[in-house]
Image (cartoon, helix red, strand yellow):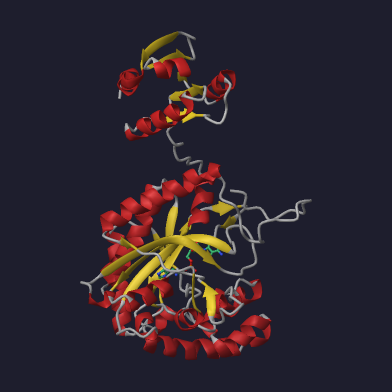
Amino acid sequence: MDTTPNKPSKNKFQRPRGTYDILPKDFKYFDKILTVCQKQAHFYGFKRIETPIFENIDIFNRGVGEATDIVEKQMFILKNGAQGLALRPEATASIVRAYIENGMTNLSRPVKLWAFGPFFRHEKPQAGRFRQFWQIDFETIGRNSPVIDAQIIQFFFSLLTRLGLKKLVVGLNSIGCAKCHSRYLKILKLFLRSRQTNLCPNCKRRLKTNPLRILDCKKEKCQEIVATAPQILDSLCKKCRANFKEVLELLDSLNIPYRLDPFLVRGLDYYNRTVFEIFLDQEKDGQKSQIALVGGGRYDNLISALGGIPTPACGGAAGVERIINVLKEQEIVPPEEKKPNVFLAQLGETAKPRALNLFEEFRKANILIAEDFSRDSLKAQLGRADRLGIKYVLILGQKEVIENQIILRNMETKEQKTLKLDQIIKEIKKILNK
Ligand code: HAM
């Protein structure tokens, strides 16, 4: 996967900035991740859902939040008669829309849904940050127990471990309920106002629109201020504190390594109570790695915000490119697809249709077989089989078709023998011990 920024090229047409082509050599990573997800989803009882790639923009305005970076700056809004539509920047709001619209409220709870697909954010392209990226998203809708929060974290931790990733750590915080939230906002605003001259211009503006987002700011000066800011955990009400304590106890009992991150608030407005991210616990050039592989949390108010009956929910999403990067860094290479051991060569006009037919018979018998039917020369076909490293070549000519025969050539010993055409699948099965 060539994710490096586009270089100047003579070619007029290049991929858009912040995007990449998934080349055949990289599909083994995508396939591996999808296969592990499918197994893990099945075991945990999640059902797959896919929503459209674009949605009514209000779903994200209301769901993700109008004063978030994602909605304010990063949404791809569609033009040309499609006003009011945007490419989806994330999955949760769309899944909730689909949950309400398709009457899933009537299903027995919890409703567990998962999705795997591309998402779009107009971000500044950099390592691990693309404008089109893939996410695996898991949502549990309908229960407010802390067990669900712990289980979602356990789910992602187990998924990444199953993929072979090591040195994972969960960053964790609770942002409380609406009451804790407003109490904290007052305290935070007071603190930030007294330091506003040192905030970046964006955060000065956020102080009025959405002060919590200042805690996410990556600017050094703002981070220095945030480091000494009051912590939301100190503003939690009794219920939220007990709830968070239970999540932590459950994670302790699951032996999932976590660190409390008092300033983790996540960049989306729909969260309440538990929020988390999963990182690689590693240092590069003396700096702790801060690239999150997974992000998520509880969102008990999103379903009602999008017009459904109030329903608690919790979920998370993992970034596929970021997982692939770590797989590559940690030299975890998924196995290559199985290669064929047999090649079918054909010679002459009568042999061609019979060869096409025979190829399909091999497919039905579940035996991998390679071919190069567009070539007529036997030498060229044998050359291709050789390059593919295939041991057995079947040669079907006009004469063989008429006499119900086929030639089997061993490419290593160069030995050839003639076999019955209508028995060839059986013979090959014997040879390959199938
Ligand atoms: P998020 O933290 O915005 O959360 O994204 C989740 C993950 O997607 C990140 O941890 C990261 O791995 C990946 N990701 C995000 N943006 C990019 C990007 N521009 N390029 C590459 N990877 C990226 C959400 O999207 C929430 N919907 C998660 C959630 C589900 N919360 C509850 N349920």
Residue 98 position, x and y percent, is 36, 74
Q: Is residue 14 above or below residue 95?
A: above
Q: Judge left or right: residue 99 versus residue 415.
A: left
Can see residue 144?
no
Q: Residue furthest right?
A: 10
Q: Determine the image quadrant of residue 403.
A: top left
Q: Residue furthest left?
A: 108
Q: Residue at 46% x, 80% y: name it.
A: 59
Q: Determine the image quadrant of residue 251.
A: bottom left
Residue 29 position, x and y percent, is 48, 46
Residue 242 position, x and y percent, is 28, 77
Task: Name the residue nearer the viewer: 23 or 416.
Answer: 416
How many numbered markers are drawn?
Answer: 0
Q: Judge left or right: residue 56 versus residue 128.
A: left
Q: Determine the image quadrant of residue 143.
A: bottom left
Q: Is residue 146 above or below residue 338?
A: below
Classify the position of the C terminus by image quarter.
top left
Task: Name the residue nearer the viewer: 333 or 75.
Answer: 75
